[in-house]
């Protein structure tokens, strides 16, 4: 069963992960061109902005969804 996460929240996370991969590619190129500091600074800033969103928005939503699914599966429902 898919988690009822909003497309917006997961889309933002996926987009930021794509940005991080791009920055890591830039870091590799920057190493070769000796321009690493700017790329690493941008990567660090993005990760610092990204992690709290993941920890405070995405993870609690996943935790609640899983708890709801487990409760629905294993806790008997009362009639009436």
Image (cartoon, rainbow, N blue to C red):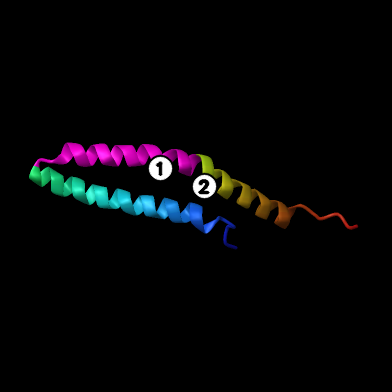
* Gap between marks 2 and 1 measured at Cα: 11 Å
Q: Is residue 48 left or right of residue 55?
A: left
Question: In the displayed structure, would residue 49 be above or below residue 16?
Answer: above
Which residue is disc 2 drawn over?
58
Q: Secondary structure at mark 1?
A: helix
Task: In the displayed orientation, state which residue is furthest to the left.
Answer: 33
- Residue 22 position within the rendered picture, expressed as x and y whole percent measured from the top left: 26, 52
Q: Residues within 10 Å of mark 2 (few under 14, many from 20)?
A: some
Residue drawn where x is 37% and y is 37% of the image: 48
Tell me which label, 2 or 1, sits earlier in the chain. Answer: 1
Q: Secondary structure at mark 2?
A: helix
- Residue 1 position within the rendered picture, expressed as x and y whole percent measured from the top left: 60, 63
- Residue 20 position within the rendered picture, expressed as x and y whole percent measured from the top left: 31, 48
Which residue is disc 1 drawn over?
50
- Residue 18 position within the rendered picture, expressed as x and y whole percent measured from the top left: 33, 54
Main structural element of the magenta stretch: helix, strand or loop?
A: helix
Residue toward you, 2 or 40? 40
Q: Is residue 20 left or right of residue 62?
A: left
Q: Residues within 10 Å of mark 1 (few under 14, many from 20)?
A: some
């Amino acid at each position: 069963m898919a988690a009822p996460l909003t497309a917006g929240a997961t889309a933002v996370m996926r987009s930021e992960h794509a940005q991080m991969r791009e920055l890591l590619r830039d870091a590799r190129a920057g190493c070769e061109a000796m321009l690493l500091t700017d790329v690493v600074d941008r990567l660090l800033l993005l990760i610092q902005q990204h992690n709290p969103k993941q920890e405070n928005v995405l993870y609690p939503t996943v935790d609640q969804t899983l708890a709801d699914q487990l409760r629905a599966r294993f806790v008997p429902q009362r009639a009436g």
